[in-house]
């Protein structure tokens, strides 16, 4: 069996997901150590550069204009504030700075030009720059790449079959097409999903089939735990157990062994021991900072203390590019 595959079947991934949990974690940990330094964690920071008033109807999202969630909305942040946030993040050990704007799609014009300025400015700080701005055109993707964008986040969220129960304002193929434009522009892909939205295990597997069919696999795969927000259609969702998160992380690691697997939203609801199990199972990225867009995240000092206890350290910026260059030389 090849180490990296793009033709996983539903049965194969289901069999992995349903392994006895200790055996699954062992298999994932073994895979993780084959492709990654288990003591390194890629540390990111996420800033909402434009909050609320989004026209989409994503059932989980407090930023949709369709739901009354009480979030404080704001237009695009000034460049100076973004640079200040990036500098503060870098001082805390962050190597990737992510900027999110609550847009259905990027519109050409002054706001997009301002985003390009932000990308250039953060790139000049020596940080990996990531954006999540909604759907893109080919030309916009090229301009972002020229400005220095390192990664673009555009999650598929769930399986193709379950997707329409979560979002109706754009299709699954709209998401896939945007990811193709990102890849064609030479930008690394950050793409994952959310568990806890009422989906079945087969839906989680379906999402992994989609992601693992990409060639190459997404460089970064965020696994989010739903944070139910009052006012959204999923506001009364019941939490999933830590074991479901561990299984999802471990399965993702085995199916996409070279990808960075990120513990993203919902980490605030995981115990330190639960997070340790996820790191053992192959997670090797987190967001640092007390807020993810509009939702809570563990305090930075708590995460740094956890890193110290577990013997983890932040991974250097641009390491994946350096590894590829080295493999080319060899």
Image: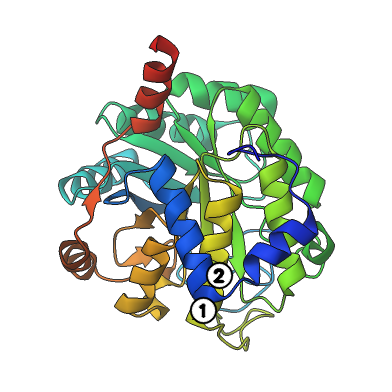
Label 1 environment density (alpha carbons within 10 Å; few <14, some 14–19, many ≥20): few
Residue 41 in sight here: yes
Q: Which of 173 and 31 is in front in this view?
A: 31
**In x, y percent, where is residue 73?**
48, 64
Return the mark for residue 179.
none
Point out the image quarter for the N terminus: top right
Give percent across and percent down for residue 68. Answer: 60, 79
Give the label on residue 247, or none: 2
The image quarter in which residue 102 lies: bottom right
Residue in view at x 57 percent, y 56 percent: 252
> Where the C terminus falls, by quadrant?
top left
Where residue 130 appears, x then y in whole percent?
44, 40
**Identity of the residue drawn at 38% across and 53% down:** 285
Residue that label 1 marks: 243
Against 241, is 123 above or below? above
Callouts 2 and 1 close, C-beta under 8 Å:
yes
Residue 195 lies, in percent from the top left, at 61, 70
Q: Position of 178 compared to 326: left or right?
A: right
Give the CA distance from mark 2 to mark 1: 6 Å
For this view, does 11 lie left or right of residue 181? right
| Element at label 2 | helix
Q: Quadrant of residue 294?
A: bottom left
Q: Residues within 10 Å of mark 2 (few under 14, many from 20)?
A: many
Instruction: Pick the residue in front: 48 or 321.
Output: 321
């Amino acid at each position: 069996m090849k180490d990296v595959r793009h033709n996983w079947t539903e049965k194969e991934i289901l069999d992995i997901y349903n392994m006895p949990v200790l055996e699954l974690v062992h298999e994932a940990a073994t895979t993780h150590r084959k492709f990654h330094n288990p003591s390194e964690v890629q540390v990111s920071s996420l800033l909402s550069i434009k909050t609320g008033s989004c026209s989409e109807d994503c059932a989980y999202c407090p930023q949709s204009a369709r739901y009354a969630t009480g979030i404080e909305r704001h237009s695009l942040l000034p460049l100076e504030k973004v640079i200040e946030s990036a500098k503060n993040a870098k001082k805390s050990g962050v190597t990737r700075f992510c900027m999110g704007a609550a847009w259905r799609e990027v519109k050409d014009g002054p706001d997009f030009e301002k985003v390009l300025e932000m990308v250039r400015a953060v790139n000049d700080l020596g940080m990996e720059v990531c954006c999540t701005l909604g759907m893109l055109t080919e030309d916009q993707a090229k301009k972002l790449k020229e400005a220095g964008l390192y990664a673009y986040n555009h999650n598929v969220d769930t399986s193709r079959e379950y997707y329409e129960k979560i979002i109706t304002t754009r299709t699954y193929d709209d998401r896939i097409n945007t990811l193709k434009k990102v890849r064609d522009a030479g930008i690394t892909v950050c793409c994952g999903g959310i568990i806890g939205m009422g989906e079945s295990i087969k839906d989680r597997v379906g999402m992994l089939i989609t992601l693992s069919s990409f060639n190459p696999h997404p460089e970064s795969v965020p696994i989010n735990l739903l944070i139910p927000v009052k006012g959204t259609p999923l506001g009364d969702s019941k939490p999933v157990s830590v074991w479901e998160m561990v299984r999802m992380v471990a399965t993702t690691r085995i199916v996409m062994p070279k990808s960075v697997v990120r513990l993203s939203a919902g980490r605030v609801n995981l115990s330190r021991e639960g997070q340790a199990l996820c790191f053992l199972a192959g997670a090797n990225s987190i967001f640092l900072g007390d807020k993810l867009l509009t939702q809570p995240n563990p305090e930075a000092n708590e995460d740094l203390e956890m890193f110290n206890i577990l013997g983890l350290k932040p991974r250097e910026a641009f390491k994946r590019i350096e590894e590829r260059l080295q493999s080319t030389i060899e």
